[in-house]
Image (cartoon, helix red, strand yellow):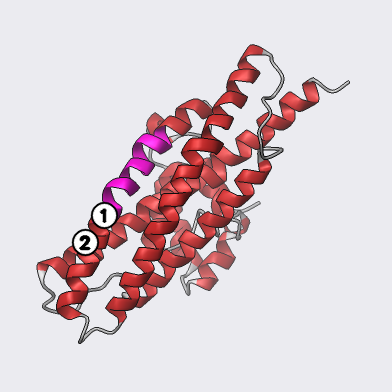
Amino acid sequence: MTVATQTVRDIALENPATIRVFEKFGIDYCCGGRKPLTEACEANSIAVDEVIAALERAAAEPVPQADNWAGRSLVELVDYIINTHHAYVNQETPRLTQLAARVVARHGDTKPELPIIQAKVAELVEELSSHLGKEEMILFPHIVRLERAMDKGQPAPRGCFGTVSNPIAMMTSEHDSAGTLMAEIRKLSGDYTPPIGACPTFLNFYNSLREFEQDLHQHIHLENNILFPKAIALEQGIGSSYQG
């Protein structure tokens, strides 16, 4: 299999350094990462050879151990997601809400896209608040218990939701919704391009939205492509050990 026919998700998993390339070209490696690279490039009107060349340069660089989560424990990964990405969302969403209000108050009359962006930011903030709570209170503790049960040679813990695949399917669907909202915000903002002569608050708002989207992509990648598949495989492995 060539790089061109590999899925974006698999490329990102094999070498986390390639994530920077996908971010640069605006290629979705989290929610839409199951597309082959060629298809993803065509959808974004990008020359696949240019992307492959950039990926090869990134692959030649050493990957810091801290960035390579595929071989780490689920407990470590859960802690990292909560302390890094969840903490970032909790810190940034009030600031984005405030910035949106200030920009709309000053420029909303002449920039009709801004009130729409503000509404979508509010929807995203509400969705993420609920989403993070469900992960931290229900799904993540269960995943931690799964790994500890495996380490101790015990049966898989029972959840109120049946198999772990059920809440994971819900969280994945919510990731898709958040990704869609961010894509709509990016399109409305012209890829976060402020008008010529924009005030510092306007510049800060669009730059903050860009940074928030990049963090959200990395956040969803860690869950959709690493944490969730490993949790499902772990539960199935423990269950097969105790059949009969």
Amino acid type at image mark 1: Pro
Is 84 in the magenta?
yes
The numbered mark at residue 94 is 1
Mark 2: which secondary structure?
A: helix
Please state, as top left, top right, bottom left or bottom right, where the C terminus lies in the image: top right
Verify CB contact (< 8 Å) between mark 2 and mark 1: yes
Q: Residue furthest top?
A: 152
Look at the image and tell me whether residue 72 can be seen.
no
Above or below, 154 against 15 in this view is above
Q: Is residue 188 visible?
A: yes
Magenta span: chief secondary structure:
helix
**For this view, does 29 lie left or right of residue 84?**
right
Which residue occupies the extreme right position in the image?
244
Q: Which residue is mark 2?
A: 98
Q: Report the residue at 17% width, 75% height from top.
A: 105
Name which residue lies at 53% across and 41% down. 14
Residue ranking furthest to the bottom: 110
Q: Which residues are magenta?
A: 80-94
> x, y (%) of residue 50?
44, 64
Residue 94 position in % (x across, y down)? 26, 54
